[in-house]
Image (cartoon, rainbow, N blue to C red):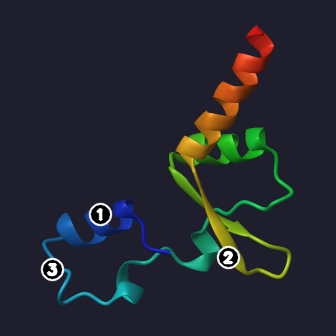
Amino acid sequence: VVSERDYVTKIALLGRTSKDTAISQISTKMANLVTASPHDSVYTCMDKMLTRDIRHLPLIDDSGKVIGMLSIKDICKVMLKETEKTIE
């Protein structure tokens, strides 16, 4: 996975160029990758994002396959809907 943060910290701030840098040199390695499972709660995903200061979580199924990408915007939409239901 390559994030905006990977790009900024590993290319732009180090004075490298995109043209001369292989993706494998800047990507987040699996050992360090924070992911979500379809079985995780919204709260769990929000906690992972907030405690690690990340905005996206790859959604991984039980076989380890990437099946989607969860964003902080997705979390906010769900939280807003829950709040609106509570208010009603």
Residue picked out by circle 2: 66
Percent position (x, y) of residue 56? 54, 56
Left or right position of 50 against 16? right
Q: Secondary structure at mark 1?
A: helix
What amino acid is at disc 2?
Answer: Val
Which quarter of the figure is the C terminus placed in?
A: top right
Residue picked out by circle 3: 17
Residue picked out by circle 1: 9
What amino acid is at disc 1?
Answer: Thr
- Between the residue at mark 2 and the residue at mark 3, the CA separation in whole angstroms equals 28 Å
- Between the residue at mark 3 and the residue at mark 1, the CA separation in whole angstroms equals 12 Å
Residue located at (50% from left, 50% from top)? 55
Percent position (x, y) of residue 31? 63, 75
Q: Secondary structure at mark 2?
A: strand
Percent position (x, y) of residue 85? 77, 19
Q: Which mark is residue 39?
A: none
The mark that comes first in sequence, 3 or 1, is 1
Q: Counting other residues with Cα less than 10 Å from the Cα at mark 1, is it few (<14), some (14-19), or many (20 or more)?
A: few
- Between the residue at mark 1 and the residue at mark 2, the CA separation in whole angstroms equals 25 Å
The mark that comes first in sequence, 1 or 2, is 1
What amino acid is at disc 3?
Answer: Thr
Image height check: is 49 above or below 4?
A: above
Disc 3 or disc 1, which is closer to the eye? 3
